[in-house]
Image: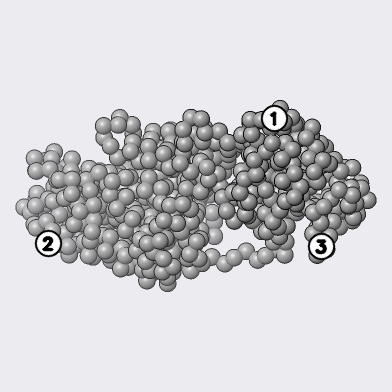
Amino acid sequence: MWITISILAVAAAFFMSGKVRSDLVAICSLLMLLIFHILTPEEGLSGFSNSVVIMMIGLFVVGGAIFQTGLAKMISGRLLKLSGKSELRLFLLVMLATAFIGAFVSNTGTVALMLPIVVSMATDTGTNARRLLMPLAFASSMGGMMTLIGTPPNLIIQDALTGAGYAPLSFFSFLPVGLVCLSVGIIVLLPTTKWFLSPKKEVPDSGTRNKSLKQLAQEYNLAGNLFRLRITPSSQAIGQTITQLDVRHAYGVNILEIRREKNHQGRLLHSVTQLSAPDTVLEEGDILYIAGEQERITQMATVLHLVLLDHPTAHGDNGLAFYDIGIAEIVLMPSSRMINRTVKEVDFRRRFKVNVLAIRRKKEYLRQLGSEKMHNGDVLLVQGRWENIVRLSAEEDDWVVLGQPLAEAAKVTLDYKAPVAAAIMLLMVAMMVFDFIPVEPVTAVMIAAVLMVITGCLRSVEAAYKTINWETIVLFGAMLPMSLALEKTGVSQYLSDALVSSIGSYGPIALLAGIYFTTSLMTMFISNTVTAVLMAPIALQSAIHAEVSPVPFLFAVTVGASMCFASPFSTPPNALVMPAGQYSFADYVKVGLLLQIIMGIVMIAVLPLLFPF
């Protein structure tokens, strides 16, 4: 027993110091439990097969898809109309909306839904996201106190009551308690998040600031001479390739991309394909994005029977998109074989499958590239599929690719997939809320994660893996067996029995306080569900022996188990927001421990009023 306590104490000390990565501390703690044979290998590794850990992995993927499709930004934009630019209104909106959802959806699922939305809202308003994400996690737990199904400990105390022959609790018996928890949370978190959750220091700029795709498009004025042409059924362009049309030679214009939209199977399966390869065969309905002078564009449209559409802008939905095709700058090296040759002579489109849109020569921007020879130090703006742009890095003798094209590609949201992501998200929520759908929450989350990948809401399976924060998964998976060790060695039972028996003679209020804070303390190291299972029968028997109603004592168990904020691994929501908010273990202690203590004091005073002894 004492070995287990020592391992837990050392781990807690390292967590508090923050000098060693939290996932490494968790793994080392798990190894010590295995080395001393406190846990078997099967028991020690059980955390990584736990449904909560698997659910967290799936929720990271779902959250990443909500970000990647721009759905988070769309929802946050609507919510921002309610909060405006006020940080106070934004804080209250996040707390209230999260608590409402958390009353009907698991707190883990609630945080997964709200996390990308809150991050997007914080970015749009210039608010420090660190001050919103921890309240988001805490509010989801507070919302869970409002209904019978809000959190597993609520169901556990219901089972304990009915098993002892008492009347069952109703669906909204928990609502007054949940409202008190939420009120206390708002009052305490409003000042403490400002005091303790200051922004992380920014990494110093290395001097090579990357230009965003939007900045590049504006700098080179790509929308200034950009036009859209649709291929009609009678067009001579149908069946020809970009090379065969040779519009640069025939009309002095440049085809930047071909956008082919498919919408035959309904809006949810709407897809957009961007094409730019020289051997792309043109089809009826294709939209050509062409750069050039308007007179030449009009001439081309007349000859080839194309319909000239509205003039797109770089800021509107009709401008250039970068779903599959991107842009980047490359600077020519002094030893480059391209120097003193024209773009046409090099034939970038055929050799490298990219298109040169413009040349930046010192402060001059050249767009008419017919006979213009390239010079040493010229910066070329190239366009093509992202994988082809990345391949340009292999030609290190001729040029250097500026910036990080892959990183910029990852930032491009697949807006046309937002309805698909929304439908999948709603399906996941429905499966978690409605009992008539025979699907477990973890299954619902994994179904949603897989659907996000196969419907294209994430660019690839690799992109899905990148959305997962493995440090958080390892931390939670390695610490879950600690609760098993505490239970197996008798530490949990010893502490709960000792504390309750020592204060039982001081009256029901003292006994209620002892049960509440014992539960609250245990939940810092053991999952709230396991703590509730251990403490519910103790609380029930203590109340019976004291000849008072067991209801307030069992409520003390569920509130104490659910309102644990001082540790990142006490509840899944706390762990989920840890990487996004760049929180340390000490951040949870500074903000969460104070809230946890105040919440306990308030509950000890309020519970006897709501549920008399």
x%, y% of residue 98?
34, 54
Q: Is residue 158 above or below residue 329?
A: above
x%, y% of residue 457?
52, 39
Q: What amino acid type is highlighted by mark number 1? A: Ile
Front tag of 1 and 3: 1
Looking at the rendered structure, which numbered label has been put on residue 238? 1
| Sequence-first disc among 1 and 3 | 1
Front tag of 2 and 1: 1
Front tag of 3 and 2: 3
Q: Residue furthest front?
A: 302
The reply to whether discs 2 and 1 touch (Cβ–Cβ < 8 Å) is no
Q: Which residue is mark 2?
A: 609
Residue appearing at x 13%, y 40% in the figure? 162
Mark 1 packing: few (<14 Cα in 10 Å), some, or many (20+)? some
| Sequence-first disc among 2 and 1 | 1
Helix, strand or loop at mark 1: loop
Q: Residue furthest left?
A: 547
Instruction: Give the side of residue 452 with respect to residue 95, left or right.
Output: right
Q: CA distance from mark 3 to mark 2?
A: 77 Å
Q: Which residue is mark 3?
A: 364
Q: Is residue 575 above or below residue 279?
A: below
Q: Residue furthest right?
A: 340
Q: CA distance from mark 1 to mark 3?
A: 37 Å
Q: Nearer the viewer, residue 194 or 221?
A: 221
x%, y% of residue 476?
44, 46
Q: What amino acid type is highlighted by mark number 3? A: Glu
| Sequence-first disc among 3 and 2 | 3
Residue appearing at x 52%, y 42% in the figure? 416
